[in-house]
């Protein structure tokens, strides 16, 4: 089992930046990749970005490309999401997740990001 804890959410004005962190513990040697997802009020959870744990491959949702950057520190078992030029549509609960092979089967508790206009 992998345990994930997110941090770094908060309230920011439009155009501002935030950096989210997600620390993994437990069976971290089994992690193949980690990702960020978000869920806005009344909407389904959607993919934001992910990164391969053993390499540098990354992927982003079209809505965050060129604004968000996912990175990792394997030594710290931590993944980050740098979010720049935030807009109110980015307001959501952001979740960190880990995959061992195909599906994301470990999830954090989520961190709230609120962007004011």
Image (cartoon, rainbow, N blue to C red):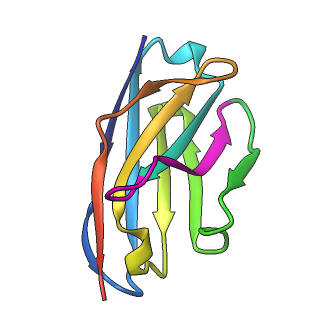
* Residue 26 appears left or right of 105: left
Image-based side of 85 in relation to 88, left or right: right
Tell me which corner region of the image, top left, top right, bottom left or bottom right, holds residue 20.
bottom left
- Foreground residue among 65 and 91: 91
Image quadrant in which you'd find residue 112: bottom left
Residue in front for this viewpoint, 116 or 55: 116
Q: Residue at x 56, y 44 (%)?
A: 72
| Residue range of the region highlighted in magenta in the rendering | 39-53
Report the residue at 43% width, 74% height from top. 89
Residue 54 higher or lower than 13, as above or below: above
Q: Is residue 83 shown above or below 29? A: below
Q: Is residue 100 visible?
A: yes
Q: In which quadrant is the N terminus drawn? A: top left
Q: Is residue 4 above or below residue 90?
A: above
Residue at image point 44% right, 78% down: 86
Give residue 14's position: percent from left, percent from top. 36, 86
Quadrant in the picture for the C terminus: bottom left
Name which residue lies at 38% across and 51% down: 94
Q: Where is residue 25? Give x, y as percent.
A: 38, 21
Residue 10 in the image: above or below residue 42: below
**Left or right: where does residue 27 sit relative to residue 60?**
left
Query: Quick check: can you spot residue 8?
Result: no
Residue 17 magenta-highlighted: no
Residue furthest left as drawn: 11
Q: Nearer the viewer, residue 41 or 71?
A: 41
Q: Position of residue 45 (x, y in %)?
A: 46, 46
- Residue 73 spot, x, y in % from top left: 53, 41
Q: Is residue 31 left or right of residue 42?
A: right
């Amino acid at each position: 089992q992998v345990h994930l804890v997110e941090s770094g959410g908060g309230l920011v004005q439009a155009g501002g930046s935030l950096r989210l962190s997600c620390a993994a513990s437990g069976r971290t040697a089994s992690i193949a990749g980690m990702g960020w997802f978000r869920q806005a009020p009344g909407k389904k959870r959607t993919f934001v970005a992910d990164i391969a744990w053993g390499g540098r491959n990354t992927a982003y949702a079209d809505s965050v490309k060129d604004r968000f950057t996912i990175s990792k520190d394997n030594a710290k078992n931590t993944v980050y999401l740098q979010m720049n030029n935030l807009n109110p549509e980015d307001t959501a609960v952001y979740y960190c997740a880990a995959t061992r092979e195909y599906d994301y089967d470990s999830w954090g508790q989520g961190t709230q990001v609120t962007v004011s206009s």
